[in-house]
Image (tube, rainbow, N blue to C red):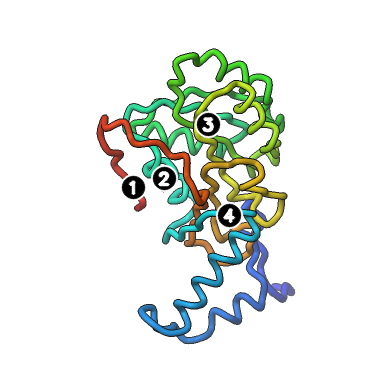
Amino acid sequence: MSLAFGRDHLAIPGPSVIPDRVLRAMHRSAPNIYAGPLVDLTAGLLSDLKKIARCEGHAVFYIGNGHAGWEASLCNTLSRGDRILALVTGRFGRGWVQMARGLGIEVETLEFAEAEPAGPTRLQAALQADTKHAFKAVITVQTDTSTSSTNDIPALRQAIDAAGHPALFMVDAIASFACEPMQMHDWSVDVLITASQKGMMTPPGLAIVFIPSIPRIPRRSGRGGIGVLYI
């Protein structure tokens, strides 16, 4: 006979344990999805999320997990055959790379040791060597759950600027959003990705992508669209 009582707690990197008050809120009847209070609720949520991100631009919902956010960031900014530079500090950085390659994007990686944050010096050197500006984007994870390594996002942005490189700066904040500081506007992050199931402690199934009010996203190269898996 088991003497255990109370809730089971799943001790894995995510999804996070959902608080009781969130679970109770889920017991309410489904709202009208076409009109009424849900419309105002959604607008309010987007506004509040932008405050957390310190985003002065736009927030977009996608029905999907963090992988859908990865895909949305790639397929809306890049074309098949474009080159990007990925700063890899753990399993989730590698996962984003794998997805990009599966979508037909050419990825060069800068690998860092386990639990070691991405080094701005190596990033700046790699971008300075790219004299033809072949890299269309730099992608990185703010905190990689698999290693607990947290990257210094403003320092990486400074390295991009010091190299004089026009690559977009795209950041995965799925594990860190609402936990670690994020100043999207002040740090000049071009695309920011998060999801509902970690720092916000709500059920999985919602990806959020933030973009600036005046995006620097260039016109696509025209080499062909990207086939998508999630969206």
In the image, 228 versus 192, the foreground residue is: 192
Looking at the picture, how far across and down is residue 75, in whole percent?
A: 37, 42
- For the point 53% across and 39% down, the residue is 170
Whether residue 170 is situated above or below residue 212 in the rendered picture: above
Disc 1 to disc 3, C-alpha distance? 22 Å
- Work out which residue is located at the far right of the displayed protein and give it: 3
Contact, mark 1 vs mark 2 (Cβ under 8 Å)? yes
* Separation (CA) of disc 1 from disc 2: 8 Å
Circle 1 — which element?
loop
Q: Is residue 12 above or below residue 220?
A: below
User: Which residue lies at the image location 66% right of the left edge and 78% below the top edge?
Assistant: 21
Q: Of label 1 and label 3, which has the lower sequence position?
A: 3
In the drawing, does residue 76 fall left or right of residue 206? left
At mark 3, the secondary structure is strand
The residue that disc 4 covers is 56
Q: Position of residue 111 (x, y in %)?
A: 59, 24
Give 184 or 24, whichever is nearer the viewer: 184
Q: Name the residue under label 1.
A: 229
